[in-house]
């Protein structure tokens, strides 16, 4: 990870190497934090953040699911993110806001722990290896929808993701694929999943997956481009037989999948995935005015 100069912590800009928390911080022990990942792109029209407001909305929703009394509202968080970007003088970066229970009581319940907020930014390139990736289905399932608030972006959920990802990458795969408790495809460790059948695009429904912001954007984009999009359960066998498969996510953007469980997908980088990826790249690089509504330009 490439360091930048300052991290925003509870209203103050702190030197990168001094942005520390106490070892007994509640969220370190229990995964009780809400976070987001946001990308900023260096475009010909200036630096632009993708879907900033939707990310902040989800951050606050996730914090609310943890019963946090966040000391900052949406506008204040927005300004803090922009301030952190500007002070670090980055043109393109990944933004990580996190709201967490700090040092206080160390019971499982966070009563007595302050709600802390931090924002870090740093340059970050491609998240997944290569132009397309090999995927391995995990023997771990995605968190049961009645085990947690599974559409919130909570740090503790990502132990499930990390373990699945480690299993896959340790065996030479680019990423894992998790099924849900009913045996349907859920998502990747940090990505939403899509298949293509002809000109029809299919993705798992909300309920057992994270409501990905890139997922929502790609669904809207695909419909605007004339594709039919269905949100429904997908069995693994259906993915094996699909014409195309791809992941979406803030970090992954639109990433084609070339095989699942060593079964080659018919089109490694198929025409629909290629089309969506190309149009998505145009959008985040401010080359399509129709979608400037998704961009926040940083002056």
Image: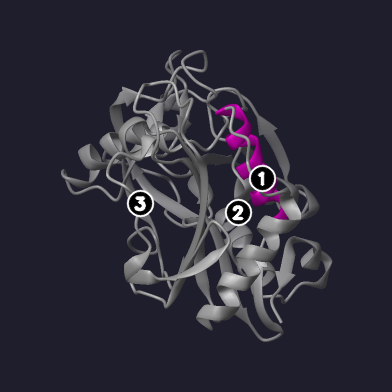
Q: Is residue 60 left or right of residue 167?
A: right
User: Which quadrant of the figure contains the N terminus?
Assistant: bottom left
Image point (50%, 71%), residue name: 93
Q: Nearer the viewer, mark 2 or mark 3?
A: 3
Mark earlier in primary sequence (2, 3): 3
Residue stretch rendered in magenta on the structure: 52-66
Q: Residue furthest right?
A: 290
Q: Tags 1 and 2 in contact by the CB under 8 Å rule?
A: yes
Which residue is the site of mark 1?
199
Residue 4 seen in the figure: yes
Mark earlier in primary sequence (1, 3): 3
Which residue is the site of mark 2?
272
Badge 2: residue crowd in 10 Å (few <14, some 14–19, many ≥20): many
Q: Is residue 50 left or right of residue 260?
A: right
Query: In front: 37, or 216?
Result: 37
Q: Residue furthest left?
A: 171
Which residue is the site of mark 3?
21
Mark earlier in primary sequence (1, 2): 1
Residue 165, image x, y percentages = 29, 41
Residue 284, image x, y percentages = 65, 69
Q: Please, what secondary structure does the residue beneath circle 1 have?
A: loop
Q: Decide whether residue 53 is among the magenta residues.
A: yes
Relative to 2, residue 262 above or below: above
Image point (59%, 27%), residue name: 67
């Amino acid at each position: 990870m490439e360091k930048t100069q300052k991290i925003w912590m509870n209203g103050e800009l702190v030197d990168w190497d001094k942005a520390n928390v106490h070892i007994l911080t509640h969220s370190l022990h229990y995964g009780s934090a809400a976070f987001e990942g946001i990308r900023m792109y260096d475009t010909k029209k200036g630096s632009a953040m993708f879907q900033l407001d939707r990310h902040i909305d989800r951050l606050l929703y996730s914090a609310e699911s943890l019963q946090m009394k966040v000391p900052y509202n949406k506008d204040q968080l927005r300004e803090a993110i922009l301030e952190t970007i500007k002070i670090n003088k980055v043109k393109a970066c990944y933004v990580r806001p996190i709201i967490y229970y700090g040092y206080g009581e160390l019971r499982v319940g966070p009563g007595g722990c302050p709600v802390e907020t931090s924002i870090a930014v740093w340059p970050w390139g491609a998240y997944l290896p290569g132009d397309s990736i090999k995927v391995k289905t995990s023997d771990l399932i995605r968190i049961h929808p009645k085990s947690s608030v599974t559409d919130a972006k909570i740090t503790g959920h990502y132990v499930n993701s990390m373990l699945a990802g480690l299993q896959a990458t340790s065996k030479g795969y680019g990423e894992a694929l998790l099924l849900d408790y009913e045996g349907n495809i859920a998502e990747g460790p940090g990505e939403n999943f899509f298949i293509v059948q002809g000109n029809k695009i299919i993705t798992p429904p909300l309920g057992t997956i994270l409501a990905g912001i890139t997922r929502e954007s790609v669904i809207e984009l695909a419909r605007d481009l004339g594709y039919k999009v269905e949100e429904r359960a997908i069995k693994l066998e259906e993915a094996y037989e699909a014409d195309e498969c791809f992941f979406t996510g803030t970090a992954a953007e639109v990433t084609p999948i070339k095989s699942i469980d060593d079964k080659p997908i018919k089109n490694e980088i198929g025409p629909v995935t290629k089309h969506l990826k190309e149009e998505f790249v145009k959008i985040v690089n401010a080359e399509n005015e129709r979608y400037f509504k998704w961009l926040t330009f940083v002056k």
